[in-house]
Amino acid sequence: MVASESPSRQVLCPVAAALDVVGDRWTLLIIRDLLRGKSRFSEFRQSVEGITTTMLSDRLKRLEAEGIVDREFYSEHPPRAEYILTAKGHGLGLVVGALSSWGEEHCEHDLTLISRDCGHHVVPVYQCTTCDEPVPRSSVRIIEAG
Amino acid sequence: MVASESPSRQVLCPVAAALDVVGDRWTLLIIRDLLRGKSRFSEFRQSVEGITTTMLSDRLKRLEAEGIVDREFYSEHPPRAEYILTAKGHGLGLVVGALSSWGEEHCEHDLTLISRDCGHHVVPVYQCTTCDEPVPRSSVRIIEAG
DNA sequence: AACCATCGATTTGATATCTAAACTTAGTTG
DNA sequence: CAACTAAGTTTAGATATCAAATCGATGGTT
C-alpha cells in the first residue's frame, strides 16, 4: 500500500509518514528522473528501469494527488501531459541523493553526484540549522518534537 | 521484489541499486529502529508500525544477506539473536534522515532530528568532498561516472 | 509434573498488488 | 489510407503480503 493509510492509524514518525508516500519500488525512481529533467510519460517509461505502464500511470496519479508533481497539459486533443516537480517534490532530492550516495559506496553503479558549480563530487551530510556547522552522522538522533 | 534482481539485469544507477535493497515498505523502518538502538525481534515487532512477524522475519534475513546487519546470538538453545547494524547499514542513516527531514516538513509527525552535541535541530545538506563547502540542492546533478 | 508465558520465528489460506501483453483513442507521418 | 506515436486503460494470471494459528525451546508457577 502506498499513500493510502487508513485515517485511523496515526503516523507519528516523519520517516513512516514519508514512506507512506514514497516507500515503494517505483516512486523514488520516477522522482530521480523528474530531478534529471524528464517530464513525459514516454520518457519515464524508457528511463525507469523495468517499470510497466500500469505502475507508471498509477504512480504519477498518486504523486499528483500528494502534491509532489503538477500535471500540465501541452495538448488538449489528444490529452498530452507533462509532469513537473512541485517544491514539495524537489524536497525529495536529498532522499534520492542519499540513496545515490549509499548506492555509490556499496553497490555496483555507473553514475555519481556532482556539483554543477565546482564540478566536484558531493555527498549528503547533516548540518545544524542554528550553528550552521556540519554535524557527524553518529551525533544525530530522532527524538519527540517539543 | 527486494534484493533479488536477476543477474542479467544490470543496474547502472546507484539509486536503483540502493532501491533494490531498501526500496520497500519495511526495510527502512527497521533500519530507523536499528539506528535508534533497538536490536531484537520483539522490539521491532512493537516499534515498526504495523509490520507482521512474517515480514519482519523475512526482512531481517534479507538485511543479513545484504551485509546490512549482523545477527549475533546471545543464546544458543533456544536460538536468540540480536541484530546489529554493520558499517554498510549505518551508511543508510542519511537516507533515513533525509526521509525524516522531508516528513517533518511535509507530513504530520511528532519527532524531529537533533544533534546530540549541541541539541539543535539538524537537516541533511550536500557537501563538496573536495572544497568541503556546502552545495545547494539545486546545483547537484547525477552524471555518468568517469 | 502439569500448566502458562515468552521469544523468535514458520505455516496457512485469503486478499491485495504487480506484471505482461493486448487494446484504445486521437493525432501524425509517409 | 496504412503504419506509427503518445499516453494511457483493461484484463487475466502471477506474486507478495496479510492475519491468525502454530511451533519448539525454555523458564517460571503451582
Image (cartoon, coloured by chain):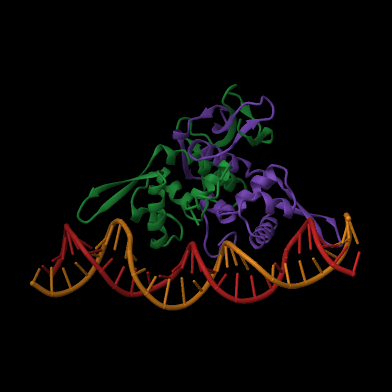
Chain colours: A purple, B green, C orange, D red
Q: Nearer the viewer, residue B138 or D2?
A: D2
- In-image side of C9 versus D19 (left or right): left
Q: Position of residue D28 (x, y in %)?
A: 16, 60
Total numbered circles: 0
Asked whether the viewer can see residue B57, the reply is: yes
Q: Residue at x 51, y 44 (%)?
A: B96
- Up-down: is C3 above or below A109? below
Tell me the quadrant of the picture where the C terminus of chain B can be found.
top right
Q: Is residue A59 left or right of residue C15?
A: right
Residue B108, can we see it?
no
Q: Nearer the viewer, residue C16 or C21?
A: C21
Q: Residue at position x 42%, y 60% from top?
A: B55
In this view, which residue lies farthest toward the top? B131
Query: In the displayed structure, would residue A69 be above or below residue B133?
Result: below
Expressed as whole percent of the image width and height from the top left, the position of residue B126 reads 60, 32
**Rendering quarter of residue D25:** bottom left
Horizontal and vertical percent for residue A56? 66, 58
Q: Is residue A136 left or right of residue A89?
A: left
x, y percentage for residue A43? 72, 50
Horizontally, residue C30 falls left or right of residue A113, namely right
Toward the viewer: A13 or A44? A44
